[in-house]
Amino acid sequence: MRTKVIPFAVALAAAALLTACSATTASDAYVEQPMSDVAVDGAMAEEAMTGGAPAAPTTSQAQDRAIVKTAYVSMRVEDVGASAARVRDLVRARNGLIANEDSQTTSESPYANLTVQVPAADLDAFLDDVAELGTVDSVSVSASDVTAQVVDLDARIGALQTSIERMTQLLAEATRIDDLLAIETQLSQRQAELDSLTAQRTWLGEQVALSTVTISISPQTAIASVNAPGFVSGLRSGWSAFTSAIAVAVTGAGFFLPFLLVLVLILVPVLIVIARRSKRTPDPATDETAPPTDELTPTGA
């Protein structure tokens, strides 16, 4: 019995040794395999399976709606400059900011156009405060739901961050130059895309947090009184037309009077000279028809 156990133990030891050698050989073969064939291709295959598609929104994301609100207010006030300054004070009081301002308060037709941003939660209260500054002609408020865009950007940003972390780990484990260049190229592309998406997400978040309000301020216009038509109104109109005609005639006479004086000064001497010459020159026709003086004397004389 003892002689049978010894060969069996020897066989078990040989089998264990062969198994250890096989495992060592397989492990060495895996380590010596190029990084570009295992790690890089594996990461690319995993990302291709996911497709970089955004994950489905969670329940909390679906409940929190992202709304972008904008408003426009047109109003008339007594003092444009003072009202514009008051609007600035209201914006600062609510921790808002003035995005753009175009105003002219010293001309005959003053105006002020302000584009401001206030917290979305304070939009209604801010509009009520602005309405107290004067007479509001029109108010319009619009809202745009951008929840889908926010969820999409968040999912893509999260996927890119995970991919960048994985590529960073592969870069630290790579030993060949070809692997390093391939991983760095992929890593730089993903980082640039992540920066772009992060900027878009930041801008969209600011649009949701701050509502944009455009305020157009103009001065109050006085309404002229119109008299009802009648005899008195016609008499006033006729008298006004008569006085206007007289004024036009007097103006015309004053305009032509200097010319008339010049003409008189020139024509009067000419007429006097012509009259004197006509008196000195005898009329030939009168001389031929008049009988001689001798023939008129009587014969007996």
Image: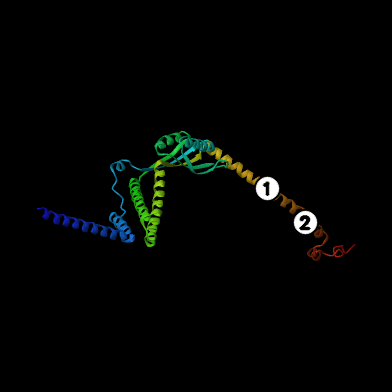
Can residue 225 be seen here? The reply is: no
Question: Which residue lies most toward the left here?
Answer: 1
Question: Which residue lies most toward the right here?
Answer: 301
- The correct choice, above or below, for 75 with respect to 5 in the image is above
Identify the amino acid type marked 1: Ala
Q: Quadrant of residue 61?
A: top left
Image coordinates of residue 234 in percent, x first then y, are 53, 39
Image coordinates of residue 130 in percent, x first then y, are 46, 36
Front-most of residues 83 and 35: 35
Labels 2, 1: front one? 1
Residue 256 placement, left or right of 159: right
Residue receiving disc 1: 253
Front-most of residues 252 and 65: 65
Crowdedness near tag 1: few (<14), some (14–19) or many (≥20) residues, C-alpha within 10 Å: few
Identify the amino acid type marked 2: Leu
Mark 2: secondary structure: helix
The quadrant of the rendering that contains the C terminus is bottom right
Mark 1: secondary structure: helix
Residue 300 placement, left or right of 139: right
Residue 261 placement, left or right of 63: right
Image coordinates of residue 117 in percent, x first then y, are 45, 41
Residue receiving disc 2: 271
Front-most of residues 236 and 121: 121
Q: Quadrant of residue 179?
A: bottom left
Rendered image: mark on residue 77: none
Image coordinates of residue 85 in percent, x first then y, are 52, 37
- The correct choice, above or below, for 179 with respect to 152 in the image is below
Crowdedness near tag 2: few (<14), some (14–19) or many (≥20) residues, C-alpha within 10 Å: few
- The correct choice, above or below, for 94 with respect to 290 in the image is above
Front-most of residues 225 and 208: 208
